[in-house]
Amino acid sequence: MLLNPPLRAGDVIRLKKHHACGNDLWEVLFAGADVRLKCTSCGRVIFIDRAKFSSRFKKRIEVAKTGK
């Protein structure tokens, strides 16, 4: 999966399935070989490998702001 711009920390994404709390929006905390995601509703943090993430990814909602 190629995203333009690439996936990076701070992005907000939507996955195909809802979390147990009913939310489907996640904030990216780390993007590498594994992706660390934080639920925007309940705050639960999960690790998911890149292959599973690619199959579960639906849409990027918000791109992280860059700048100093």
Image: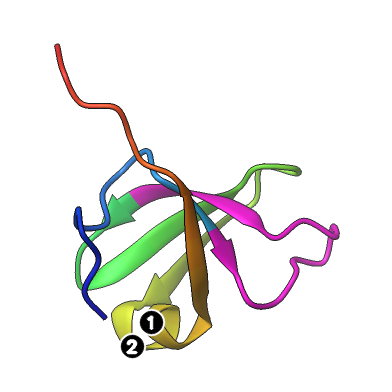
Q: Furthest-left residue in view?
A: 68
Crowding around mark 2 (Cα neighbors within 10 Å: few <14, some 14 to 19, many 20+) is few
Residue type at numbered disc 1: Ser
Give the labeled residue for mark 1: 54
At x 20%, y 64%, the residue is 32
User: x%, y% of residue 46?
Assistant: 53, 62
Of marks 1 and 2, the one in the foreground: 1
Q: Mark number for residue 65?
A: none
Q: CA distance from mark 1 to mark 2?
A: 5 Å
Give the labeled residue for mark 2: 51
Numbered disc 2: secondary structure: helix
Residue type at numbered disc 2: Ala
Crowding around mark 1 (Cα neighbors within 10 Å: few <14, some 14 to 19, many 20+) is few
At x 37%, y 38%, the residue is 10
Please check the rendered image and state whether residue 23 is part of the magenta-colored stretch, yes or no: yes
Give, as a single range, the part of the protein colored magenta: 14-29
Numbered disc 1: secondary structure: helix
Please check the rendered image and state whether residue 26 is part of the magenta-colored stretch, yes or no: yes
User: x%, y% of residue 57?
Assistant: 48, 74
At x 31%, y 43%, the residue is 9
Task: Name which quarter of the figure residue 7 lies in.
Answer: bottom left
The answer to whether the residue labelled 1 contacts the one labelled 2, judged by CB atoms less than 8 Å apart, is yes
